[in-house]
């Protein structure tokens, strides 16, 4: 026999970063909150992040580091709950951390510390979490939301969608957030994989022979550029620089890679003046991994000594090395994507409270929303900030 209907102040669907933060904040404000998580344990995506050490925020996070149909939407939440606010919580729990590069903060120990901290805050504020529960139905009538799972039915005047996007389906990710949004008449910006490796085909498939080779580059698509490492894989391109531009890349676009950041197009011509008997391959091997240097020299057709090659050809080679054009034929999809671009339209939500404008009491936070951060702790900061904004409004 089904249990009786439980009455609460708010139900949060999803026990990830945003959902746990929301429940913790609302609970501290005296709200009776239940978090429903379909996985057997909450915070699974937190646990695998940052190589198991959780890149929990980025000290440089501003709205400029996010992709959204409305680039201004994230400003309110991010300005009111800043990286230093989450850092203070981490410090209060005695969790040691360090800055790695580019403002990225990681736990010295394990990502488990962040999950345990959030669970402790939720429990300490009177919140409850149930796991291993699939939501079998959601309805809304008379200002109350009714949520059914396998073994319980709960009602509350507020419902928070914090189920994330479809990235990393092996962790249990689904498109449930979008189904719920559409059920309540909210528009959804078409989701696509983000922070995801790019695949190469045709002649460019030859670069797969370089699988495992990494080097520092500037990768760009359109007007967006990132200087970080690029990694060749057996399917195409990956590494931080490529993952960053993948969030902006669309089918048909080319990705430009500068293999020699800081060098101008005439560097080979200048090298010819000072060392005419040297070979381009030898020069490239001083600045790039050996296998990559040889492959690039071969593709450009740089053979013989510098003295054997006309200045015009050396200049063209320098230009190509600084602006190598790749034509990806796709991505490795949601299975390998760290996050999702797109989601519940920000036009449907209040930027201050994350509440749906047309459905009072319905909220959407975290990756479920059309706000996607760069690689490097930005998506966690959005989870904390949007969860905090909704939690303060419940």
Image (spheres, rainbow, N blue to C red):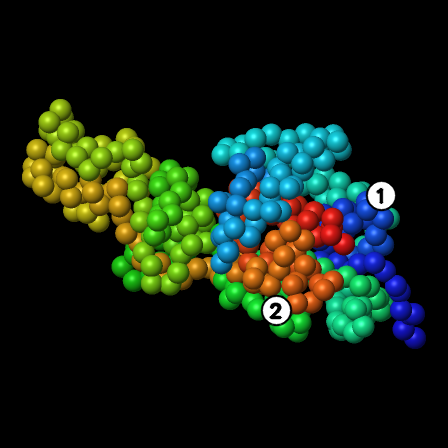
Give SS at disc 2.
loop
Viewport quadrant of the N terminus: bottom right
Q: Where is residue 281 in the image (x, y as percent from the top left)?
A: 21, 37
Q: Position of residue 43 (x, y in %)?
A: 70, 50
Viewport quadrant of the C terminus: bottom right
Apparent side of residue 114 relative to residue 76 in the rendered image (left or right): right
Give me the C-alpha separation between circle 2 and circle 1: 34 Å
Quarter of the view holding residue 94 = top right
Q: Which of 29 and 376 is in front in this view?
A: 29
Query: Count of labels shown?
Result: 2
Give SS at disc 1.
helix
Tell me the crowding category of disc 1: few under 14, some 14 to 19, or many 20 or more residues within 10 angstroms, Cα based.
Answer: few
Apparent side of residue 365 relative to residue 208 in the rendered image (left or right): right
Tell me the crowding category of disc 2: few under 14, some 14 to 19, or many 20 or more residues within 10 angstroms, Cα based.
Answer: many
- Residue tagged by mark 1? 124
Q: Where is residue 252 in the image (x, y as percent from the top left)?
A: 33, 63
Q: Where is residue 26 in the image (x, y as percent from the top left)?
A: 78, 49
- Residue tagged by mark 2? 186
Is residue 201 depicted above or below 51 in this figure?
below
């Amino acid at each position: 026999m089904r249990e009786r209907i439980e009455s609460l102040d708010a139900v949060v669907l999803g026990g990830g970063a945003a959902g746990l933060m929301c429940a913790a904040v609302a609970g501290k404000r005296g709200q009776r909150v239940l978090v429903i998580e379909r996985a057997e344990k909450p915070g699974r995506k937190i646990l695998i992040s940052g190589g198991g050490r959780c890149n929990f925020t980025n000290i440089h996070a501003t709205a400029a580091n996010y992709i959204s149909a409305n680039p201004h939407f994230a400003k309110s939440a991010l300005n009111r709950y800043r990286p230093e606010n989450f850092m203070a919580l981490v410090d209060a729990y005695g969790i040691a951390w360090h800055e790695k590069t580019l403002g990225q903060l990681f736990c010295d120990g394990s990502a488990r510390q962040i999950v345990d901290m959030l669970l402790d805050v939720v429990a300490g504020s009177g919140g409850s979490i149930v796991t291993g529960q699939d939501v079998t139905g959601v309805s809304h009538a008379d200002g109350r939301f009714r949520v059914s799972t396998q073994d319980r039915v709960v009602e509350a005047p507020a419902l928070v969608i914090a189920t994330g996007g479809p990235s990393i389906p092996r962790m249990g990710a689904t498109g449930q957030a979008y189904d719920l949004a559409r059920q309540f008449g909210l528009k959804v910006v078409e989701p696509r994989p983000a922070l995801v490796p790019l695949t190469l085909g045709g002649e460019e498939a030859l670069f797969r022979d370089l699988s495992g080779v990494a080097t520092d580059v500037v990768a760009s698509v359109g007007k967006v550029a990132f200087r970080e490492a690029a990694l060749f894989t057996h399917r195409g391109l990956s590494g931080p620089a490529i993952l960053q531009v993948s969030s902006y890349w669309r089918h048909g676009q080319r990705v430009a890679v500068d293999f020699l950041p800081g060098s101008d197009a005439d560097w080979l011509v200048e090298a010819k003046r000072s060392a005419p008997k040297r070979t381009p391959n030898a020069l490239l091997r001083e600045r790039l991994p050996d296998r990559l240097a040889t492959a690039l020299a071969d593709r450009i057709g740089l053979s013989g000594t510098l003295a054997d090659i006309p200045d015009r050809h050396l200049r063209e080679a320098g230009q190509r090395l600084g602006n190598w054009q790749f034509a990806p034929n796709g991505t490795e999809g949601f299975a390998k994507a760290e996050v999702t671009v797109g989601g519940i339209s920000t036009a449907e939500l209040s930027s201050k409270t994350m509440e749906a404008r047309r459905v009072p009491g319905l909220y959407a936070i975290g990756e479920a929303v059309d706000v996607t951060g760069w690689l490097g702790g930005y998506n966690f900061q959005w989870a904390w900030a949007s969860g905090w904004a909704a939690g303060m409004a419940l």
